[in-house]
Amino acid sequence: MSVLVTGGAGYIGSHTVLTLLMNDIDVIVVDNLSNSSYESLIRVEKIAKKEVKFYQCDILNTVDMEYIFSTHIIDSVIHFAGLKSVGESVIEPIKYYENNVNGTLNLAKIMIKHHVNNLIFSSSATVYGNPERIPLDESCNIGGTTNPYGYSKLVTEQMLSDIVKSTSLKTTCLRYFNPIGAHESSEIGESPQGMPNNLMPYITQVAIGKLKLLKIFGQDYPTQDGTGVRDYIHVMDLAEGHLAALKNTNNGLPFRVYNLGTGQGYSVLDLIKSFEDISGIKINFEFASRRPGDIAECWSDSKLAENELGWVAKRDLSTMIRDSWNWQKNNPNGFN
């Protein structure tokens, strides 16, 4: 089997590429390296002792994408490529719709043209917006998204669900929650360029002294301690979820959606306290006002993925934090 992975040099992408290689699946990676590093793939090859075919190009570049699909026999596509910062999407919505929606449409058109019929799409729990109930399952209402990033994922899901009705394309949308952690080897992990957008790399960069303190956005949410609650999931569990979806191919159905989460919510202060207990390092923080687009809590019911894909998150919060911290300690400047 040969799988094309868009955005395969990124955080979740690189861990998924490694998981595919370790399961004897040939991988072709497309990444424009706008928010990732080729070094991640060099390290993936080192761990797996296998080669990855890599193309530095943008999925919006039809000429380059046509060349790749014409050159290789591709069985399936796992699609990570896209922009992912909630805060940035509020400031630059056009950029997010162009990359996330138009990029996916361009990819789908090329897949259909070349008779590549299986797509696994990297979606997000942000499509649920303000949750109608907790935990969130796949039957919950979608559409109340609170930021352009989430809406770009929602629009893309709807677009793909329409496309599969009149083409041979089959699509699995994986709505996952908050990935943290790193591969246990500490060779690959989350390596943000510039200021981290996500909580865990922000904490670890404060711990090693790269950043002075952590800003907690909001202390007045209706949660147990006033800070936001999220479902944190180990990036390797996510990678294994993509492998499970690849093997399952929707049970023959043209369009399927699955949550990937642990089913457990932790607040920002929970995460800080657990990190301090594991690392022995005190995290300096201060409270700031809420960010536009943020919600109080978001955590999952992932029983559908367990029942239909045979997938369940295996790694607990301590393992997630330990692996995040080991990655940061061993790679203080990430892949740079």
Image: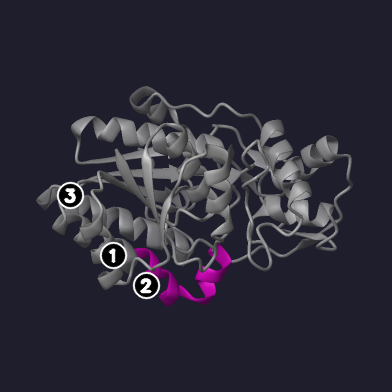
Q: Amino acid at mark 2?
A: Glu
Mark nearer the viewer, 1 or 3:
1
* Residue at x 81%, y 63% (from the top left corner): 211
Q: In the image, which disc is placed on residue 284?
A: none
Marks 1/3: CA–CA distance:
21 Å
229 left or right of 302?
right
Instruction: Give the quadrant of residue 322.
Output: top right
Looking at the image, tell me whether mark 2 or mark 1 is earlier in sequence order. Answer: 1
Task: Residue 45: tell me if it is visible.
Answer: yes
Q: Is residue 89 magenta?
A: yes
Locate the N terminus by quadrant.
Answer: top left
Is residue 108 visible in the rendered structure shown here? Answer: no
Q: Nearer the viewer, residue 51 or 207?
A: 51
Q: Which mark is residue 164?
A: 3
Which amino acid type is shown beneath numbered disc 1? Met
Give the CA separation, mark 2 to mark 1: 17 Å
Relative placement, left or right, of 77 versus 135 is: left
Residue 102: x and y in percent read 31, 68
Q: Which amino acid type is shown beneath numbered disc 3?
A: Val
Q: Tell me the residue that label 1 is attached to.
A: 65
Give the magenta part as a residue range: 86-101
Q: In what element is the residue under mark 2? A: helix
Q: SS of the residue at dot 1?
A: helix
Query: Which residue was labeled with disc 2?
Result: 98
